[in-house]
């Protein structure tokens, strides 16, 4: 009986010590959490406790902190990006709108018919620019909502790529560009969203038309990889890394009415179809690859 009592006392003492140690660890975790809740810091909680539950709790809190900080930084970057986009769009709308108002006033006061027609032509061009911008913004807002309105079906990549090149062929010719097209003979078919694939090709080729120094290579390999490459002296490795960012534009290309949404749309569509997308800048060439 005496030994049982001694053992009981020892066990109770050990339990009390463990409870005290756990309470101390909990207080330490609470203090460190209060100090590390700053979302701008990357420091995580640490614990010297050997208790598995305490260590699991610390690990769980650290995981939550990491996710919270990531969400916060994503939100802050998106907020800054949105403010920049609003500023850019407001500027891009105000400039042609100011010009339209000015030329309309000139046309109203002009008696010479030829001169009036010239003013009205300029007004029509500026109006088309604004229409393109508003349509592009509306389209992107619909795309960004995440709603998919079609079913996947078999898509002949060969034919769709060839058709996309031919649709823009007159535009390439007007720039003095003769595309070097290499499409594999074997048929490449994939279960995809047809409109997504068509828009991806259209946007990628339009991007090449915008940045090309006078050449274009379009390749489709048997494994389903489409490679579009062109010389682009106005670009750099840094700018190429940002090409797929929303609202990113290279200043030298802003006069074509583009607002940095075309390649962002490509990225969104590629991700929805789980198609790896890569952009790189090598030896003065912009190279974009997408694997279906």
Image (spheres, rainbow, N blue to C red):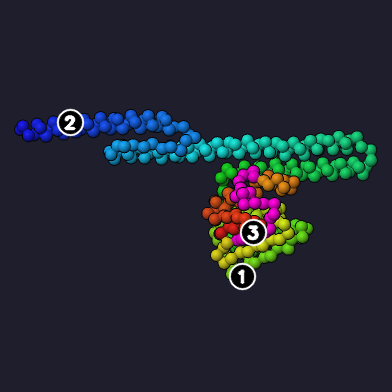
The answer to whether residue 151 shows anywhere in this view is no
Q: CA distance from mark 2 to mark 3?
A: 73 Å
Asked whether, in this view, residue 231 is left or right of residue 148, the answer is right
Q: Which residues are magenta?
A: 226-248
Please name the residue that numbered disc 3 is placed on.
283
Please name the residue that numbered disc 2 is placed on.
13
Q: In which quadrant is the N terminus drawn?
A: top left
Please name the residue that numbered disc 1 is placed on.
185
Q: Is residue 230 magenta?
A: yes
Asked whether, in this view, residue 205 is left or right of residue 59, the answer is right
- Tell me what residue is drawn at x 17 percent, y 31 percent: 12
Instruction: Please state which of the two labelled residues, at mark 1 or mark 2, is closer to the viewer.
Output: 2
Q: Which mark is first along the chain, 3 or 1?
A: 1
The answer to whether residue 34 shows anywhere in this view is yes
- Tell me what residue is drawn at x 59 percent, y 67 percent: 187
Name the secondary structure under disc 3.
loop
Q: In which quadrant is the C terminus drawn?
A: bottom right
Instruction: Please state which of the two labelled residues, at mark 1 or mark 3, is closer to the viewer.
Output: 3
């Amino acid at each position: 009986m005496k030994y049982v009592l001694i053992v009981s006392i020892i066990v109770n003492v050990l339990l009390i010590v463990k409870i005290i140690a756990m309470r101390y660890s909990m207080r330490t975790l609470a203090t460190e959490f209060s100090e590390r809740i700053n979302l701008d810091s990357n420091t995580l909680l640490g614990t010297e406790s050997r208790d598995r539950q305490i260590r699991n709790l610390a690990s769980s809190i650290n995981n939550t902190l990491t996710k919270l900080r990531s969400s916060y930084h994503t939100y802050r970057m998106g907020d800054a990006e949105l403010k920049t986009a609003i500023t850019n769009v407001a500027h891009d709308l105000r400039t042609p709108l100011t010009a339209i108002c000015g030329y309309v006033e000139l046309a109203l006061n002009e008696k010479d018919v030829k001169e009036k027609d010239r003013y009205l032509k300029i007004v029509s061009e500026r109006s088309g620019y604004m229409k393109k911008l508003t349509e592009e913004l509306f389209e992107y807002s619909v795309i960004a909502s995440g709603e998919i309105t079609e079913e996947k079906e078999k898509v002949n990549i060969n034919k769709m790529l060839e058709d996309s090149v031919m649709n823009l062929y007159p535009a390439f010719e007007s720039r003095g560009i003769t595309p070097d097209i290499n499409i594999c003979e074997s048929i490449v078919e994939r279960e995809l969203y047809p409109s997504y694939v068509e828009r991806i090709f259209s946007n990628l080729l339009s991007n090449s038309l915008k940045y090309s120094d006078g050449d274009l290579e379009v390749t489709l390999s048997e494994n389903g990889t489409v490679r579009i490459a062109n010389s682009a002296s106005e670009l750099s490795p840094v700018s190429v890394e940002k090409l797929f960012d929303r609202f990113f534009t290279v200043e030298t290309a802003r006069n074509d009415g583009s607002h940095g949404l075309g390649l962002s749309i490509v990225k969104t569509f590629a991700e929805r179809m789980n198609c790896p997308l890569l952009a790189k800048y090598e030896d003065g060439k912009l190279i974009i690859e997408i694997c279906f």
